């Protein structure tokens, strides 16, 4: 790791460390991915602001898919017990992940959670990341796809304000479109903003209230 | 939050280094922060000075060098600076993943990492530099 050591008369040393702050996590993420691949499981990392609808979306997707394939949910963002109940009521395995810094999930915590569940019968794992718009993007978890959830209640300029979130995304969901006209937010403009940052990325407008877009989201997640 | 978690991992890594080497006092920690990591340097400095208090890193200088983003296009082989989004209503133009030549999606190959480059410190007097190799 250390490459050069230069001594100077007053015993001051300059040591080259070249120590990446992200590498340790990236390595654990690869290990998680290898474990999941061995079991034929696709993990989907769901990121987005607090209240954007991550838990509700995961709940709807689980409801649609649980009879067809084995699903588990890792929840890193259980702010209330209602959140947990929403998923646990569906009778799929749920692991709550409590972080120390309350900032983001990391591959180490996800690895520990994966060792708590029986992977043998699973095909799909949803990981709800902490509702923080900056941090999680730096910390891959070993998932096969990352979904970033934006909701129209975050306003017209949400994408421009948090460009960083979208760089690592595979699918972007624009949720709560049932509220778009009340919020005076143009969904088409939000989609255009996402495409300015990352052309060609799949953007799916959804509403957990009326079910719009949920079929499309389900099939694109199954395709990853 | 982001800056705090980066500052803590810098401090953890340097304190780990101090544990395994004969260090009397850390003078400077030099970081290379990628353009795409969106780290706010003033906030990072603030967090750093707050959490280094009462450690062997207290009053050390944090030097932050910025690393420009480099992207590569899998379609047309463009390699270079990203295309910037100029009218994004933000103070600074936003780097994007759109190829400036063919408009496909590029891959960032530089500028998303955050690394400790060097540590400058005063060694304990009787130590030989040859003894401080780690790993
Ligand atoms: N109107 C509307 N409300 C929604 C929609 N999706 C979620 N919500 C509501 O938004 C609130 C926050 O949702 P939640 O799933 O807890 O967000 P999370 O913090 O991202 O997990 C809850 O009251 C949901 O019922 C939607 O599509 N339309
Ligand atoms: Mg939630
Ligand atoms: Zn190109």
Image: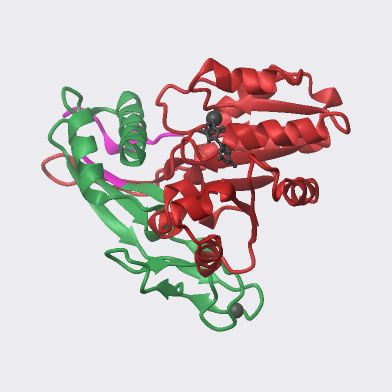
Chain colours: A red, B green
**Horizontal side, residue B31 vs residue A165: left or right:** left
Res. A18 visible in picture: yes
* In the foreground, A194 or A207: A207
Q: Is residue A88 above or below residue A36?
A: above
Q: Position of residue A121 (x, y in %)?
A: 86, 25
> What residue is drawn where x is 38% and y is 48%?
B115
> What residue is drawn where x is 27% and y is 64%?
B91
Q: Is residue B91 above or below residue B27?
A: below
User: Which residue is most to the bottom?
Assistant: B101
Q: Position of residue B105 (x, y in %)?
A: 60, 69
State the image quarter where residue B23 is shown. Answer: top left
Res. B28 visible in picture: no
> What residue is drawn where x is 57% and y is 69%?
B106
* In the foreground, A96 or A116: A96
State the image quarter where residue A83 is shown. Answer: top right
**Horizontal side, residue B132 vs residue A53: left or right:** left
Per the rendered image, the range of residues in magenta is: B118-135
State the image quarter where residue B74 is shown. Answer: bottom right
Q: Is residue B74 above or below residue A34?
A: below
Magenta span contains residue B125? yes
User: Which residue is most to the right?
Assistant: A68
Q: Position of residue A173 (x, y in %)?
A: 61, 50
């Amino acid at each position: 790791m250390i490459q050069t050591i230069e001594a100077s008369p007053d015993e001051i040393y300059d040591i080259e460390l070249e120590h990446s702050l992200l590498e340790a996590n990236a390595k654990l993420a690869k290990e998680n991915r290898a474990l999941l691949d061995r079991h034929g499981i696709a993990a989907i990392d769901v990121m987005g602001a607090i209240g954007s609808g991550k838990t509700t979306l995961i709940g709807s997707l689980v409801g649609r898919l649980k009879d067809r394939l084995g699903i588990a949910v890792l929840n890193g963002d259980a702010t209330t017990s209602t959140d947990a109940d929403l998923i646990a009521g569906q009778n799929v395995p749920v692991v709550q992940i409590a972080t120390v810094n309350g900032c983001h999930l990391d591959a180490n915590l996800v690895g520990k959670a994966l060792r708590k569940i029986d992977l043998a019968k699973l095909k799909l794992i949803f990981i709800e990341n902490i509702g923080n718009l900056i941090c999680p993007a730096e910390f891959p978890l070993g998932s096969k796809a990352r979904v970033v959830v934006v909701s129209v209640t975050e306003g017209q300029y949400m994408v421009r304000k948090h460009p960083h979130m979208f760089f690592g995304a595979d699918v972007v969901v624009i949720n709560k479109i049932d509220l778009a006209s009340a919020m005076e937010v143009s969904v088409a403009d939000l989609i255009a903003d996402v495409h300015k940052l990352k052309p060609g990325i799949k953007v799916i407008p959804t509403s957990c209230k009326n079910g719009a877009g949920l079929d499309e989201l389900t099939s694109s997640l199954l395709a990853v | 939050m982001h800056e705090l978690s980066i500052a803590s991992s810098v401090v953890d890594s340097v304190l780990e280094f101090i544990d395994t080497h004969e260090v009397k006092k850390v003078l400077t920690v030099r970081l290379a922060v990628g353009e795409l990591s969106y780290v706010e340097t003033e906030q990072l400095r603030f967090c750093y000075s707050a959490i280094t208090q009462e450690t062997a890193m207290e009053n050390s200088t944090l030097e932050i060098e910025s690393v420009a983003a480099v992207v590569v296009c899998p379609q047309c082989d463009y390699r270079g600076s990203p295309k910037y989004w100029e009218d994004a209503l933000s103070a600074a133009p936003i780097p994007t993943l759109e190829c400036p030549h063919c408009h496909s999606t590029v891959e960032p190959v530089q500028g998303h990492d955050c690394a400790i480059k060097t540590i400058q410190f005063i060694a304990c007097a009787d130590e030989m530099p040859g003894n401080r190799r780690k790993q």
